[in-house]
């Protein structure tokens, strides 16, 4: 079985789908691994490191993916790359079938099988495959580092001969994986941290990290079977914004992490709320890649709005490319090991397997995931 790992298309992307250690594990399984030239350069992995791990380096992408049984990427392919793939090959990458419909249709029309890393189930067995969580954790860390650099204050309380400096107040909206890591990082830097989430069940986790949990009665909220927060009604959003406006007005740093799986991110921080924040405050929109939680935030831009610095930089894990690549590679290789049929020497897409049922969107051009409704029209 031949596994191809192309260099990422997006020039801003620094991560690679597989690191040299991942190549070693795949070769040990019995796979033949080919990598694109410069595949790991963004994460400081040389082509020689991949060769030493057992991979063959192929300069031209068309030669690389032609005839490959499996193609591994971080992000989805662009249209001309889809045409290079052989019918029947398995393409594995981040690919949201709800928000990237056109890319899914292109791959399906090419007769390719699609396994989406976003769709990996949040179960005990699949925990080591959960690339969304591993990358979100890094994004939460990076968000705090960006905020600490941008805000005109120090994070910790300091007692000096010139007087006492009060700690920076950080307000984290959303206490999922990214939010919890943001809370933990801000606390380690010495900030005073408060956090909000629609799910009351995360209060204990927030408090265990040393932050104060902000409560508001929104009525019935809860979470999906996958562990994501459910979308709020218009009335619940209004009640939530009224509470959040008060907390944002007191904060030096606000970090928003709220996402609804398969849908655009909800607007949480409005223009009016930004207007009420202190001059010099910083807001980091961690959901800018899926529409943004902050009104007026722009992907890959830092804007000043009413004296508040709004950071809308996308794809934050790429800023810590070495660890982001290591984690994603581990998740992907864990997935292949989990589905590997030792007797056949290849990946087995058993339709009764819970991971395959959840994450396989298309099988050889045919839509097969019951959770997703698709037509080519």
Image (cartoon, rainbow, N blue to C red):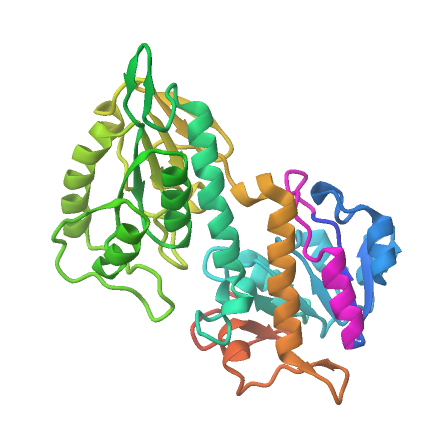
**Which contiguous range is marked in magenta?**
9-29
Can residue 101 be seen from the camera position used here?
Answer: no
| Left or right of residue 349, residue 149 in this image | left
| Left or right of residue 199, residue 47 in this image | right
Q: Residue at the top extreme?
A: 162
Residue 83 placement: quadrant? bottom right
| Left or right of residue 41, residue 194 in this image | left
Work out whether residue 150 or residue 95 is closer to the camera in this orientation and state it.
150
**Residue 81: image location, x then y, percent:** 72, 55
Seen at 37% across and 48% down, the residue is 179
Seen at 33% across and 49% down, the residue is 209
- Does residue 23 show up magenta in the picture? yes
**Residue 244: image location, x then y, percent:** 20, 39
Seen at 79% across and 62% down, the residue is 65
Work out whether residue 207 or residue 340 is closer to the camera in this orientation and state it.
207
Q: Residue at the front extreme?
A: 161
**Residue 339: image location, x then y, percent:** 63, 79
Work out whether residue 280 or residue 263 is closer to the camera in this orientation and state it.
280
Residue 195 placement: quadrant? top left
Seen at 60% across and 63% down, the residue is 331
Above or below for 76 versus 155:
below
Above or below for 171 versus 110:
above
Q: Quadrant of the N terminus?
A: bottom right
């Amino acid at each position: 079985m031949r596994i191809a790992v192309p260099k990422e298309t997006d020039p801003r992307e620094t991560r690679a789908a597989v690191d040299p250690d991942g190549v070693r594990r795949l070769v040990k399984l019995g796979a033949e691994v080919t990598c694109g030239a410069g595949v790991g350069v963004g994460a400081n992995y040389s082509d020689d490191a991949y060769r030493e791990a057992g991979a063959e380096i192929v300069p031209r992408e068309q030669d690389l993916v032609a005839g490959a049984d499996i193609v591994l990427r971080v992000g989805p392919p662009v249209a001309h790359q889809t045409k290079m793939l052989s019918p029947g090959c398995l393409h594995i990458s981040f690919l949201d079938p709800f928000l990237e419909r056109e890319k899914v249709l292109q791959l399906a029309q090419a007769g390719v099988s699609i396994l989406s890393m976003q769709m990996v189930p949040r179960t005990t067995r699949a925990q080591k495959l959960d690339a969304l969580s591993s990358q979100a954790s890094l994004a939460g860390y990076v968000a705090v580092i960006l905020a600490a650099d941008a805000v005109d204050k120090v994070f910790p309380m300091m007692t000096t001969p010139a007087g006492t400096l009060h700690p920076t107040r950080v307000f984290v909206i959303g206490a999922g994986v990214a939010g919890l890591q943001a809370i933990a990082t801000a606390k380690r830097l010495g900030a005073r941290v408060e956090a909000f989430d629609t799910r009351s069940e995360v209060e204990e986790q927030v408090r265990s990290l040393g932050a104060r949990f902000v409560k508001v009665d929104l009525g019935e909220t809860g979470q999906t079977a996958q562990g994501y927060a459910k979308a709020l009604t218009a009335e619940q959003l209004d009640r939530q914004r009224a509470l959040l406006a008060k907390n944002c007005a007191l904060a030096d740093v606000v970090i928003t992490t709220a996402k609804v799986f398969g849908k655009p991110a909800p607007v949480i921080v409005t223009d009016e709320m930004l207007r009420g924040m202190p001059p010099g405050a910083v807001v980091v929109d961690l959901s800018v890649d899926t529409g943004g939680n902050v009104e007026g935030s722009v992907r890959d831009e830092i804007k000043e709005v009413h004296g508040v610095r709004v950071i809308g930089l996308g794809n934050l894990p790429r800023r810590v490319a070495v660890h982001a690549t290591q984690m994603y590679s581990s998740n992907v290789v864990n997935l292949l090991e989990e589905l590997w049929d030792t007797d056949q020497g290849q990946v087995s897409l058993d339709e009764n397997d819970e991971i395959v049922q959840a994450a396989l969107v298309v099988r050889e051009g045919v839509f097969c995931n019951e959770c997703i409704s698709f037509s080519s029209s």
